[in-house]
Image: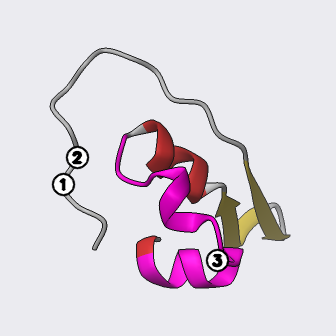
């Protein structure tokens, strides 16, 4: 676990993501989403650049996502 969330500051964070929906007869039957969790964790102050300097996206997500 990366740690607890900081106290509410009123600040906004920005990160990218995608959601893919599979439809069957006009109804959503499956949803798959992927977001840039590392960017969100950095903006929340839960992850620093030094922590991820020599890591891959897969190893980072295994630890923090």
Q: CA distance from mark 2 to mark 1?
A: 4 Å
Q: Write down the region rendered in magenta.
A: 45-63
In which quarter of the view is residue 27 placed? Answer: bottom right
Q: Residues within 10 Å of mark 1 (few under 14, many from 20)?
A: few
The residue labelled by disc 1 is 4
Q: Earlier in the sequence, mark 3 or mark 1?
A: 1
Residue occupying image coordinates x 51% and y 29%: 13
- In the rendered image, the quadrant that contains the N terminus is bottom left
Q: Which numbered disc, 3 or 1, marks the residue closer to the eye?
A: 3
| Callout 2 touching callout 1 (CB < 8 Å) | yes
Q: Using the image, tell me which numbered label, if any, was put on residue 57.
A: none
Q: Residues within 10 Å of mark 3 (few under 14, many from 20)?
A: few
Q: Using the image, tell me which numbered label, if any, was put on residue 5.
A: 2
Residue occupying image coordinates x 67% and y 64%: 33
The residue labelled by disc 3 is 55
Is 37 situated left or right of 1 in this image?
right
Eyeballing the image, is 36 above or below 31?
Answer: above
Is 37 situated left or right of 6 in this image?
right
Is 34 situated left or right of 38 in this image?
right
């Amino acid at each position: 676990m990366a740690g607890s969330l900081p106290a509410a500051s009123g600040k906004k964070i920005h990160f990218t993501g995608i959601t893919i929906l599979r439809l069957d007869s006009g109804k959503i039957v499956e949803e798959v989403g992927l977001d840039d969790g590392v960017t969100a964790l950095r903006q929340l102050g839960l992850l620093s650049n030094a922590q991820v300097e020599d890591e891959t996206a897969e190893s980072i997500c295994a630890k923090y996502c």
